[in-house]
Image (cartoon, helix red, strand yellow):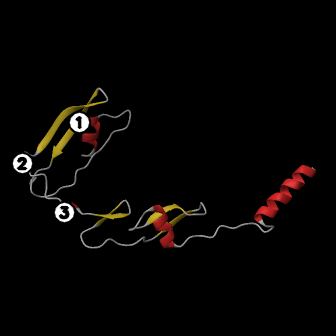
Amino acid sequence: MRVLGGALCLLLAACGSAPRTCQGESDAAFCTRLGKNCGSVTGADNCGANRTVQSCGACSGSDSCVSNVCGGSAASSPGCGVAQAAGVRTGTIAVNGVDRSYTAVVPSGYNPSTPLALVFGWHGSTGTGAGMHSAKRA
């Protein structure tokens, strides 16, 4: 009992006798600490509590907010410049020595000089590429 009392005295001497409280950070400090500069952000604050900041800022010019970080827009890309017929293509690619299948879809009205988003979709461990392709149509 005496050792426990001694340890308690050392703890109180190091921390003070009053309980310590966490000083919350400002919205700007929260956004900066998380590396976010646009949009609504949710995460753990410096005290460990979950919190949401409605706006960490807005992007300027042609920049867009992607994952709460301002960045260049797709308009800054000239497009791939390679003509492709619209339609569905399948193929395989070797990943760590294992052939994996893929499906590529070129949309109707594709223009090689107009930038488009490139979208990737991965199925879960029990899914298939064909299942992913048909699911997008549902």
N-term-proximal mark, 1 vs 2: 2
The percent position of residue 125, horizontal first and vertical second, equals: 38, 34
Number of numbered discs visible in the structure rendering = 3
The percent position of residue 47, horizontal first and vertical second, equals: 61, 63
Estimate the spatial distance between the alpha carbons at disc 3 and disc 1, rounded to whole Å: 28 Å
Please name the residue shown 25% across and 35% down the image.
Answer: 130
N-term-proximal mark, 2 vs 3: 3
Q: Is residue 29 above or below residue 135?
A: below
The image quadrant that residue 57 belongs to is bottom left
Q: Residues within 10 Å of mark 3 (few under 14, many from 20)?
A: few
Estimate the spatial distance between the alpha carbons at disc 2 and disc 3, rounded to whole Å: 19 Å
User: Which residue in the protein does label 1 denote?
Assistant: 102
Amino acid at dot 2: Ala
The percent position of residue 16, horizontal first and vertical second, equals: 78, 67
Amino acid at dot 3: Ser
* Mark 3: secondary structure: helix
Q: Give the mark toward the camera: 2 or 3.
A: 3
N-term-proximal mark, 3 vs 1: 3
Q: Is residue 16 left or right of residue 59?
A: right
Q: Residues within 10 Å of mark 1 (few under 14, many from 20)?
A: some
User: Which residue in the protein does label 3 denote?
Assistant: 76
User: Which residue in the protein does label 2 denote?
Assistant: 83
The percent position of residue 98, horizontal first and vertical second, equals: 29, 26
Please name the residue shown 43% across and 62% down the image.
Answer: 35
Please tell me which residue lies in front, 52 or 22.
22
Amino acid at dot 1: Tyr
* Mark 1: secondary structure: strand
